[in-house]
Amino acid sequence: MAAAPPALGGSARPSRAPGAAGRRWPPAPASPQRRSGDAVGMQGPVAGRDPRSGPSERFPVAAVDGILKDVVGSYLREQPYEPARCRDMVEDMAEVIKTRLKDLMIPRYKIVVVTHIGQLNEQSMQIGSRCLWDPVSDTFSSYVFKNASLFALANVYAVYFE
């Protein structure tokens, strides 16, 4: 199982369960967190698996990173935080990202796009995700944006469909 994308703000602090005096929950990951662009296990075939059954080419993480940066930046560069407007923009951004990814015509990958917008007002927020997937062929891309009044997080999960 692959590690989750980094939490917003770069902090990898685990949360504490209620009444868990001093215990860390969830337990610390066994391996370092993976950042977008890392291709875990894409170097060679996995033991017991037919190497021809995986993707014929790697998922274009660099191209997806560029799409995320372009779409989120163009929507939010000078945008002040307004709850009603941001609610609409988060849906619009996810739809535009999904459409631009479809234009790449990446064969046999199921794509999930998740976007968040929040107000910057001297508070913190941790966003995490966990996925059950094949670390050889599945991957993700993530982009964090901040301006004077808001933050945004856009994640794209790419799951290979065999």
Image (spheres, rainbow, N blue to C red):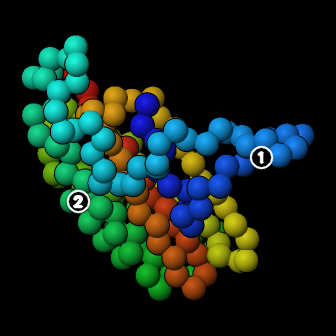
Q: Nearer the viewer, residue 73 or 143?
A: 143
Is residue 88 in view?
Answer: no
- Tell me: 65 left or right of 131: left
Q: Residues within 10 Å of mark 2 (few under 14, many from 20)?
A: few
Location of mark 1 (residue): 16
Position of residue 79 relative to residue 69, above or below, is: below
Question: Which labelled disc corresponds to residue 77?
Answer: none
Q: Residue at x 30, y 41 (%)?
A: 40
- Tell me: 25 left or right of 64: right
Position of residue 53 relative to residue 75, above or below, is: above
Query: Which percent across, then down, holds residue 123?
Result: 73, 71
In terms of image quadrants, where is residue 120?
bottom right
Name the element at disc 1.
loop
Q: Residue at x 13, y 23 (%)?
A: 51
Location of mark 2 (residue): 62
Q: Residue at x 61, y 42 (%)?
A: 28
Name the element at disc 2.
helix
The quadrant in which the N terminus is found is: top left
Q: Residue at x 36, y 76 (%)?
A: 74
Query: Which percent across, then down, holds residue 35?
Result: 39, 54
Which of discs 1 and 2 lies nearer the camera? The answer is 1
Q: Are marks 1 and 2 in contact (CB under 8 Å)?
A: no
Q: Residue furthest top?
A: 48
Is residue 60 in view?
Answer: yes
Position of residue 137 relative to residue 145, above or below, is: above
**Amino acid type of the residue tagged 1 in the rendering:** Arg
Q: Residues within 10 Å of mark 1 (few under 14, many from 20)?
A: few
Query: Which percent across, then down, holds residue 138?
Result: 31, 36
